[in-house]
Amino acid sequence: LVADLERNGVRFRLVHIPPDRSPMNVDVLLHGHTHVPRNERREGVLFLNPGCVTRPNRGSPASVANLDIGPDGKLTWNLIPLRQAE
């Protein structure tokens, strides 16, 4: 399942498994699957992954993220590490 949408002039694609190549006509690709936080620009596309709350992977902390899209299309991405219950 893939969902494409546009907010404030920014073109997004939401997909579970990230593609090997950057998609065309997309500014930001939001994905999951790896359970590892990601904030990486590849071939002009910003790949974002908030990580995972319940089963983080590869030593990453449990996390979520907040994405703010300003009226001018400016993106602010904040990764929020979560503390594990002791």
Image (cartoon, rainbow, N blue to C red):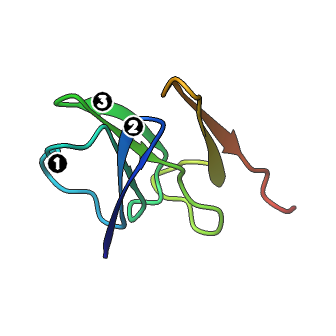
Which disc, if any, is residue 23? Answer: 1
Residue 11 lies, with reference to residue 73, above or below; the image says below
Q: Quadrant of residue 9?
A: top left
Q: Gap in Å between the C-alphas at discs 1 and 3? A: 12 Å
Residue that mark 2 sits on: 10
Q: Is residue 23 left or right of residue 15?
A: left
Q: Gap in Å between the C-alphas at discs 3 and 2? A: 15 Å
Q: Residue at x 35, y 32 (%)?
A: 40
- Three-letter code for the amino acid on which mark 3 is drawn: Arg
Residue in the foreground of this view, choosing between 57 and 75: 75
Residue 23 lies, with reference to residue 40, above or below; the image says below
CA neighbours of label 3 inside 10 A, class few (<14), some (14 to 19), many (20+): some
Element assignment for label 2: strand
Residue 42 lies, with reference to residue 38, above or below; the image says above
Q: Earlier in the sequence, mark 1 or mark 3?
A: 1
- Three-letter code for the amino acid on which mark 1 is drawn: Pro
Element assignment for label 3: strand
Q: Residue at x 74, y 50 (%)?
A: 82
Evaluate if marks 1 and 2 touch, with contact meaning CB atoms under 8 Å apart. Answer: no
Q: Gap in Å between the C-alphas at discs 1 and 2? A: 14 Å
